[in-house]
Each structure stands twice: as structure tokens, then as C-alpha cells.
Amino acid sequence: MNRIASCFEKCAGMGRKALIPFITAGDPNRQVTVPVMHAMVKAGADLIELGVPFSDPMADGPTIQRSSERALETGTSIHHVLEMVAEFRRTDAITPVVLMGYLNPIENMGAKKFAQAAQAAGVDGVLTVDMPPEEGAEFEQICAQYELAPIYLLAPTSTEERIAKIAASAKGFIYYVSVKGVTGSQAPDVSEVAAKVEAIRQQ
């Protein structure tokens, strides 16, 4: 069983949800990222989403945009992010790590080269915000070859057909965006989110 599946199984056995915090790698500098990852685990994180800084994070609100800007100002690249995961893995072989970011840095590195390096570093999954499943078949195959979970997004506007399509091919978990628009732009309607999540679970 992979680390992501083990994480959710453990949480289910304890009758609770998984705590999945997010940070941008390299913010405020590269030296603090791995210590912060360990601190999150110590504070109760079950899985870590590690943001790969990108110059045009179109789906993110101002908080994460500024975080990416600060990380890029320190020179943080996708190669540095993978080095951070590898360093984290030297003392934590259990906590799943999912990289969250945009397709451009992966394409620049080369999808296969990225997947090889990600597996070697100890990455468990990849959430690529701007790659819909309709365009992800080749990347899914590469991820499968290197035991990485390609994670897709669903949103309040997702149709039943799209929910079914993503649920059928989902690996790791499905990321549900709780509001329309960029992250942090508004507070979610909790009852609407609960209803949508339940509909997704039925797939």
C-alpha cells in the first residue's frame, strides 16, 4: 500500500479526517522549508501539500501569489523542491508529500525526467492545477510508471459527467475546490460544499 492510501486508511481507522496543510517551497527561504515540513507533521499533519513556486499562479489568490513571488526571489526551482522532499525523506519515510503547482515547470524539465526525479526524492503525488484530465493521459501513464498519483481538481461548477470521469480515473485523492474563482477569494458555503462532496463520494 502506498503512503497516501495508508494515510487515509489510518485516519479512517481513527474515525477522523486527514489534516492536509499547504506551504510554498522556498518561502520565505529555502532553508526553512524542510524544518517547517517536519514541524507540520509534529503538529498533526497527516499529508503535506508542497507548492512548487510559479511566476503566473493564475488559480491562486493574493496570499499564495505573494508566497510564490517570495520563493522565486530566493531562486527556488522545481529542482530545489525535489531536493527538499529528498531531505525531508531522510528522517520521515511515512508522511505523504504531494507537489502542487502548474504544468510549465514540469514541461520545462520534461515529464519523464520529472517523474523519475520525483519518485527518487520520495514524492507521492502531483496536483497540476492547469492540466485537466482530458489532456493528462500521457502524464498519467508516466506517473503510473513511477508510482506517482496524478491528482485532479473538481469545482462547484463541475458537471455530473465530469465528476464521474475524474472519479473513475482518480488516484491518491480528489481535490475539491470549495469556491468559484481563485483561492481565498471568498468564504465557502459549508452546506453546499458538504452536498457536493457527498455527491463526489457516491461515484
Image (tube, helix red, strand yellow):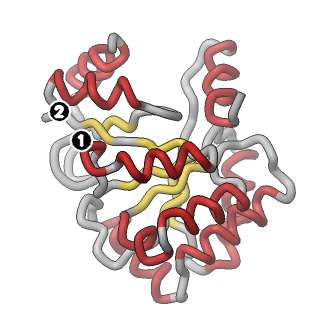
Q: Is residue 23 above or below residue 154?
A: below
Secondary structure found at label 1: loop
Tell me how far mark 1 sits from mark 2, CA to CA.
19 Å
Q: Residue at the spot x=32%, y=21% of the render? A: 197
Q: Nearer the viewer, residue 67 or 167?
A: 167
Residue 16, x across and y down, in percent: 59, 19
Secondary structure found at label 2: loop
Q: Residue at the spot x=53%, y=42% of the render? A: 149
Tell me the amino acid under the disc marked 1. Answer: Ala
Horizontally, residue 59 falls left or right of residue 8, namely left
- Could you say which disc has been placed on residue 158 in the image? 2
Q: Is residue 177 above or below residue 83?
A: above
Q: Quadrant of residue 54?
A: bottom left
For the image, the number of numbered tags is 2
- In the picture, the quarter occupied by the C terminus is top left
Horizontally, residue 70 falls left or right of residue 85, namely left
Q: Is residue 25 above or below residue 137?
A: below
Horizontally, residue 46 falls left or right of residue 166, namely right
Residue 46, x across and y down, in percent: 65, 37
Q: Residue at the spot x=51%, y=52% of the render? A: 142
Please tell me how crowded label 2 is: few (under 14), some (14-19), or many (20+) other residues with Cα within 10 Å.
few
Q: Residue at the spot x=68%, y=72% of the render? A: 32
Residue 145, x across and y down, in percent: 59, 47
Marks 1 and 2 in Cβ contact (< 8 Å): no
Please tell me how crowded label 1 is: few (under 14), some (14-19), or many (20+) other residues with Cα within 10 Å.
few
Q: Nearer the viewer, residue 105 or 68?
A: 105
Kindly identify which residue carries mark 1. Answer: 187
- Could you say which disc has been placed on residue 136 in the image? none
